[in-house]
Amino acid sequence: MNQFHSFLVDVKEKYSGKTAFRFQLNDEVFEKSYESFFEDVHTLAAAFHANGFKGNENIAVIGANSYEWIVSYFAIAISGNVTVPIDKDLPSERIIEMFADYRITAVVYDTELASTFCAIKGDIPATRSFLKIGNSVIEEWEEGYEAFLLTGIQSPMQFADPEDENKLSVLLSTSGTTGKSKGVMLSQKNLCLNAYATNGLTCPFDETMNPLPFHHSLAGIAIFMVLARGKAMCITTLRRFQKDLGVYRPTLLYAVPMILENYHKNIWEIAKKQDKLHEMKTLMETSNQLLGQGIDVRHKLFDQINALFGGRIRSILSGGAPISPEIVSDFRSWGIEITVGYGITEVSPVVSLNYWDNYDDSSVGLPLPGVEVTINNPDENGKGEICVAGDCVMSGYYNNPEATEDSLKNGVFFTGDIGMINERGFIIITGRKKNLIITSNGKNVSPEELELPILKLPYVHEAVVYQDKNEIAVQVYFKPESVDEKSKSTLAEQLRTDIQKINAQWVNYKRITKISTRDTEFEKTPSKKIKRDIFYTE
C-alpha cells in the first residue's frame, strides 16, 4: 500500500476546508488547506514521473524549513522514489560525501544553497536534476521549482501501490555523538504507524509551531502528527522562531531542551533582577495547591510568562536530548505542560511519551501503542540495554550490513541506551552503552549519572564525564555570566570543592579524580547533543 498517499487522502477527506499549513513570504502570512496541500503533493509527484524519476531513485531535500520542503518530502516518496532529507548546515565536503554514499540522482534545495551546488555540482556527477525553490534567477544547470511543478499538471499520474509495504521510502541520516553518521532505512508504514500511535497522547492543541529543522527525525514526524490530528502547522525556523511566536501564537510548540533551558534560565533571572524571586515561588506554590483542588489559575497568575510564547501556549513537546525534571515541573507550575518523550531515528522515531494526563517527570514516558520495549540483560537494579520492537523499527542501515547486524536482531532494535522500566511501566534512561566507563575492577559506570549533580551547580553550563586511563575525569564549561562575575581560577577552585562533596555520595569506584575546564562550548550534533568522540577512540 502507498501509505503516504492513503494518509493524505484520509486527512484531506476528514479535515476538508481546514487549514493545514501557515507560512510567511515577505512578512505576509499565507495559508494552505488540506485539499490544496494534497493537490500540490499530487502534482509534484506527477512531475517527478514526467521528468524520468519513476521509482526507486534517491532524491535529496535540503534547505530551510518551508512549505515547498514539506511538499517535496511527501511527493518524492509517493511517486515511488526515496526521500533523503539532508542537513542544510553541513559543510560542502560532507554534502558531496553523502550524495555519493546515498547515490542521490536529484535534489530539491532553496536559494540560499544555490552557490553551494554551483560549486560542487562537478563533484556529484550522479545528480542529474537540480530543483531550486525561490524566485531568484535560474541558472542553465538548474530547474525552477514552479516550472518543474507545472510539468506535473500537464502529465498526471496514477499512484500504484508498492508490492512491499516495507519498501524503503525515506532515508534519514543519524547524527550520532560518536563516529560517522549512518543512513536509516524507513518505510511509509514505519512513519505512518508512528504518527497515528501518538494521536491523542499529547495535550490538546489548535495550532502548532515547529522551529526544528525538518531534516531532523522529530521535526519530520511532527508534520505527520499534526496532520493526523487535523490541526494547522505554522512553519518557521530557529532563526525566526522568537519573532514568529508573536505572529502565529501557537498552542503547541516543538522544541529541543536547549531552547527550554534558555527560557527557563531567563525567566528566573528576570525574577531575580526585579526582586520577585520570593513572590514567584509563593505564586507557584499557591497555583499548584489550587490545581490539586481542580482549580487552574496558572494562566492568570503567569500571563507574562505565557506571553513570551505568544500568549496562547499550552504545551511544549520536547525531544532530542534529556531535560531536567525541575524545568518540566516549573513550566507546569506556570501553566505550560512539557511533554517529554524518547525517540531514536531508527524507530521512526518516537518510542515513548509522557502522556499529557499520565506522566512521570523522572522518566521519558510510556511506550507508544504498538511499541514493545524490553531491557536486555538487566543487572540487579533492573538496568540494561533498552530494546525496541514493533512496526516502527527500521529495516536496517543503508549499504551497511555490519552496523545493521550489530543493532538489529530478529526485528528487535538494540538502542545502545541504558535504562530500566519502573513499576508503573515508565522508561527511565540512565546512560549510553557506548559511553559506559568500565573500571579496572570491572565495574560499569554511567557518565551521565555522574554528570547530573555537576550540571546542577549554578555556575556550570556543560559537563562531560569520561575515562582517562584508569581515572574517571570530567571536563566543564562554565556559564559565561559566571565567569564575568568571578575569575575562572576562582570558579575552578569552587568546582574542585563541590566535586569533592559530590564524590562523597558515590562509592569509591564512581568518584571523579581528574578535573579540567574549557573556554568554549562542546561541539554538538545537529540535534544539539554533545559529541563525545573527542574523549576516546574506538
Image: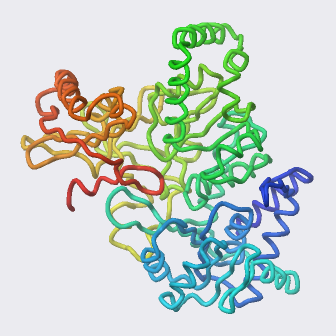
Residue 68 placement: quadrant: bottom right
Residue 146 placement: quadrant: bottom right
In the displayed structure, does residue 226 sit left or right of residue 477?
right
Q: Is residue 145 above or below residue 430?
A: below
**Farthest residue toward the right?**
17
Depth check, front residue: 511 or 306 = 306
Of the 4 image quadrants, the one containing the C terminus is bottom left
Q: Position of residue 5 (x, y in %)?
A: 76, 67
Identify the residue at image location x=58%, y=79%: 115
Q: Position of residue 251 (x, y in %)?
A: 73, 36
Q: Is residue 3 above or below residue 271?
A: below
Identify the residue at image location x=13%, y=48%: 468
Count of numbered marks: 0
Q: Position of residue 129 (x, y in %)?
A: 64, 87
In the displayed structure, does residue 78 sit left or right of residue 471?
right
Q: Is residue 114 above or below residue 447?
A: below
Identify the residue at image location x=52%, y=53%: 390
Depth check, front residue: 155 or 329 = 329
Q: Is residue 42 above or below residue 67?
A: below
Of the 4 image quadrants, the one containing the N terminus is bottom right
Q: Position of residue 232 (x, y in %)?
A: 79, 48
